[in-house]
Amino acid sequence: MSTAIHGIIGYTITPFSANGENLDLPALGHSIDRLIESGAHAIAPLGSTGEGAYLSDHEWDQVAEFSLAHIAGRVPTVVSVSDLTTASAIRRARLAERLGADAVMVLPTAYWKLSEAEVLQHYRAIGDSIGVPIMLYNNPATSGTDMSVELILRIVKTVENVTMVKESTGDIQRMHKLQVLGEGQVPFYNGCNPLALEAFVAGATGWCTAAANLIPALNLALYQAVQANDLERAKALFYQQLPLLDFILKGGLPATIKAGLALTGLPVGEPRRPVFGLNETGRMQLQALLDQLI
């Protein structure tokens, strides 16, 4: 299955009611349809953009069940099952597998700093509990755990169903190193929007991006240009969308994507507190960027 997950992997948001207290599943369905109809090659629910860390277990289960039922196998799915404890991550991974996820994504989130042995055991325990592939996710800015390329490859060699790596540190050299030390055998995916072009040139199999909610045609065109080895066109397409990609990164994924969806006709509520939505100035800046691209 890992080889079938490629290209533009779109993150979904988790819509809330106006007061932020309740899930808005119909709006989630509309956002999923927009991603699929715009050409996303795969969908990744409940990641950072989907505010999975801010949902109760019951809410998380509802979003996972609804998302996978609504996607209904139209494109491959990678469900983020990360949680603070191994037991909770296993519970989520088993549920995602039971609901039909093609793969799960695991970020080793921690309050206490984890040793390499603890990180390895976390992945081993999850891998032993499910039969679907695992996308190892390295994003120290949100997890508090930074996995070296050497540790990542140890995990890949030790845990049979860890078959993919999503790299979000913003360090392109790690992607090159992963290619070299992994001898080109470990599919890796870019998780840092402003590095999209460099990551594809370095050999990335796909781009995990929330931007697909707002500028899917540009995201897809960039991927297609790289696949066609048309680097001049790829460069032009990348720099065309770079100001928005930078804005999304700096403004925060849930805040910017939810504001952008509202500006393009799909109200999905604001992020769950303590995260703020975009202020009026931010919305005006986002609207100006979108006006140039859509």
Image (cartoon, grey):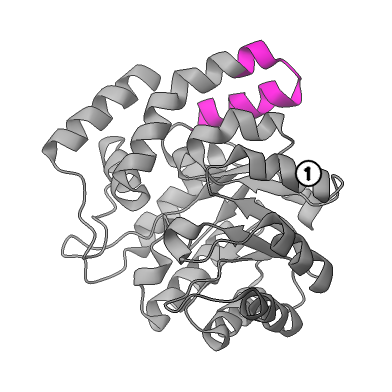
Q: Residues within 10 Å of mark 1 (few under 14, many from 20)?
A: some
- Rendered view: 190 above or below 46: above
- Classify residue 274 by image quadrant: bottom left
Q: Residue at x 40, y 70 (%)?
A: 53
**Residue lying furthest bottom in this view?**
87
Q: Looking at the image, can residue 205 be seen?
A: no
- Rendered view: 242 above or below 85: above
Q: Is residue 227 magenta?
A: yes
Q: Which residues are magenta?
A: 216-234
Q: Quadrant of the C terminus?
A: top left
Q: Quadrant of the N terminus?
A: bottom right
Q: Residue at x 26, y 36 (%)?
A: 263
- Give the left or right position of residue 121, taking residue 79 as reference: right
Mark 1, secondary structure of its residue: helix
Residue 91 picture location, percent across and down: 57, 85
- Give the left or right position of residue 189, taking residue 229 as reference: left
Residue 187 picture location, percent across and down: 76, 49
Residue 94 picture location, percent across and down: 64, 81
Q: From the image, tell me which residue sits under label 1.
A: 179
Pick the front one: 72 or 286: 286
Pick the front one: 199 or 206: 199
- Give the left or right position of residue 81, taking residue 155 as reference: left
Magenta segment, prevailing SS (helix, strand or loop): helix
Q: Specify the amino acid type for callout 1.
A: Gln
Q: Looking at the image, can residue 29 be seen?
A: yes
- Classify residue 173 by image quadrant: top right
Q: Residue at x 51, y 84 (%)?
A: 85
Q: Is residue 13 magenta?
A: no
Residue 120 picture location, percent across and down: 69, 76
Pick the front one: 50 or 232: 232
